[in-house]
Amino acid sequence: MQLNDKWQGLCWPMMDSLRCVTAALIYFAISITAVAKYSDGASKAAGAFGFFATIVFAIDFYLIFNGVAKFLKQGDFAEENTANKAEEENSDSDSD
């Protein structure tokens, strides 16, 4: 659907991380309900798969968060380097 091209004002990595957290919480709550409320084998299997899905969504959130953090650190480092270079070029030192 290419929504990222249509709605460029949204922070898409943040939206993706919110999706991961929301899905993990929903799967966790439903898994606990399935295991605690029903005692048949199908409900226990559904609870186990729900817990597995919770772990997968939590790992996805962790990977997205680390990727965004590394990107932001690189941006800050690049901005600091350009600011330092600009200061060095504009300085009036006579060390040349």
Image (cartoon, rainbow, N blue to C red):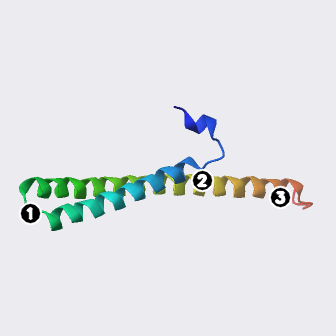
Q: Earlier in the sequence, mark 2 or mark 1?
A: 1
Determine which residue is flagged by label 1: 39
SS for tag 2?
helix
In three-dimensional space, the C-alpha distance between marks 2 and 1, rounded to whole angstroms, equals 51 Å
Q: In which quarter of the image is residue 4?
A: top right
Residue 46 horizontal/vertical position (percent): 17, 53
Cα distance between the residues tagged 3 and 1 = 70 Å
Q: Residues within 10 Å of mark 3 (few under 14, many from 20)?
A: few
Residue extending furthest top?
1
Which residue is identified by label 2? Answer: 74
- In this rendered view, identify the residue nearer to me: 14 or 32: 32
Q: Residue 87 carries which label?
A: 3
Q: Where is residue 41 in the image (x, y as percent from the top left)?
A: 7, 55
Q: Mark 2 or mark 1, which is nearer to you? A: 1
Q: Residue at x 23, y 65 (%)?
A: 32
x, y percent for residue 14: 53, 54
Identify the amino acid type marked 1: Ser
Say which amino acid is labelled 2: Gln
- Pick whichever of labels 2 and 3 is earlier in the sequence: 2
The foreground one among 7 and 58 is 7
Please give left or right for residue 72 compared with residue 19 in the image. Answer: right
Amino acid on which disc 3 is placed: Glu
**Towards the viewer: 94 or 84:** 84
Identity of the residue drawn at 16% across and 68% down: 36
Quadrant position of residue 39: bottom left
- Disc 1, SS: loop
Counting every numbered tag in the picture gives 3
Q: How crowded is mark 2: few (under 14 residues within 10 Å), some or many (20 or more)?
A: few
2 or 3: mark nearer the eye: 2
